[in-house]
Image: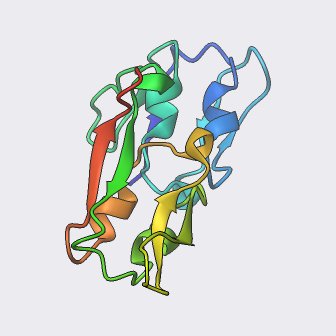
Amino acid sequence: MAFFITKDCTGCTACQRICPTHAISGEKKQPHIIFDPACIDCGACGRICPAGAVADPFDRMALNIPKKEWVRPVFDLDRCTACHICIDACPANALDAVLQKVKDLHPYPVLTREPDCMGCGFCAAECPLDAVILEKNSNS
């Protein structure tokens, strides 16, 4: 069951541009649709939609949230074992493994492409050690 776009869609293409799986199609100024099998339920389409025309799989309308207020992953390096499950879970490829600890040759996850992060939370959901915390950007 996937997110879906309602009749209130204005065809602004914001959802189509942000979708990491290219599950959304439509022409500018025309209603868009979500191809159910390709939707990964990340919710980015609903958060970005200025018309409030996206509903979740339970028929609840998604809320438009300014992108600067989306949550971002923060990594607790004391809990993290550098397994990289979070990196593999990121549909936007916004995370990388980087050496971060002195005298430790294990690369740990870091949000290297913040503009690409959709705040979907898949990284946190997949972390077996709860080492990923989702927080709003402190600069917002």
* Image spot of residue 22 (x, y percent): 68, 50
Please indicate whether residue 76 sits to the left or right of residue 26 in the image: left
- Residue at image location 75% in from the left, 14% down from the top: 29
Name the residue furthest front: 103
Residue found 48% across the figure and 38% down from its top: 44
Q: Nearer the viewer, residue 42 or 9?
A: 42
In percent of width and height, residue 128 lies at 23, 77
**Above or below for 111 versus 48:** below
Choose between 36 and 113: the one closer to the eye: 113
**Residue 115, x across and y down, in percent:** 61, 38
Which residue is situated farthest in the right direction here? 27
**What is the tally of numbered marks visible in this picture?**
0
Q: Is residue 103 visible?
A: yes
Residue in front for this viewpoint, 77 or 84? 77
Residue at figure coordinates x 63%, y 49% from the top left: 23
Quadrant the N terminus occupies: bottom left
Residue 16 location (% of width, % of height): 67, 36
Q: Is residue 5 visible?
A: no
Q: Quadrant of the C terminus?
A: top left
